[in-house]
Amino acid sequence: MTDHVARLYAFAIAVLVFFAAWVGVAAHPWATSAAAKPDLRVAALVAKERRVRAETLAVRRVLAVRRQQAAAAANAPAPAPPPPVRIVTLPPLTITKTS
């Protein structure tokens, strides 16, 4: 082949055939039955995601309750201060004498 144009066309067609074969192999058309089986790792991941979402909702509920309690405590009037301490001196109950 001394014709450079023919070589160029042959090379271009070879590259196109190569990439078409690559796409065909990468698509795995023969593996349709294996793809139908559920993957256990994916099922475990979905279960973990559900658990994490449930825990997140529970934490959000607890935080909402605590925020409401804090807001109610902030709006509530302050408790009355305790009465002042009185010091009382009483006479002794018994008198002891030494001889």
Image: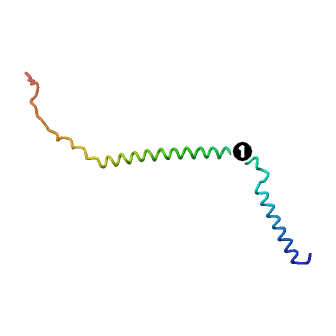
Residue name at image x 41 percent, y 47 percent = 64
Figure quadrant of residue 12 = bottom right
Q: Residue at x 21, y 43 (%)?
A: 81
Looking at the rendered image, the quarter that the N terminus falls into is bottom right
Colouring method of the image? rainbow
| Residue 94 or residue 13, whichever sits in front | 13
Which element is circle 1 on? Answer: loop
Asked if residue 90 is positioned above or below residue 55 in the image, the reply reads above
Judging by the rendered image, the residue that carries numbered circle 1 is: 37
Residue 73 point in image, percent of width and height: 31, 46
Task: Identify residue type, mark 1.
Answer: Lys
Q: How many marks?
A: 1
Image-based side of 63 in relation to 1, left or right: left
Q: Residue at x 76, y 56 (%)?
A: 27
Give above or below for 27 relative to 36.
Answer: below
Image quadrant where one finds the C terminus: top left
For residue 24, what is the image quadrant?
bottom right
Label 1: how many Cα within 10 Å (few below 14, some 14–19, many 20+): few
In this image, 48 relative to 73: left or right? right
Farthest residue to the top: give it: 99
Where residue 13 sits: x, y (%)? 84, 69
Relative to 43, 94 lies left or right: left
Q: Residue furthest right?
A: 1
Residue under the image location 46 percent in, 47 percent down: 60
Q: What x and y, as percent, mark residue 68?
A: 37, 47
As displayed, is residue 15 above or below residue 80? below
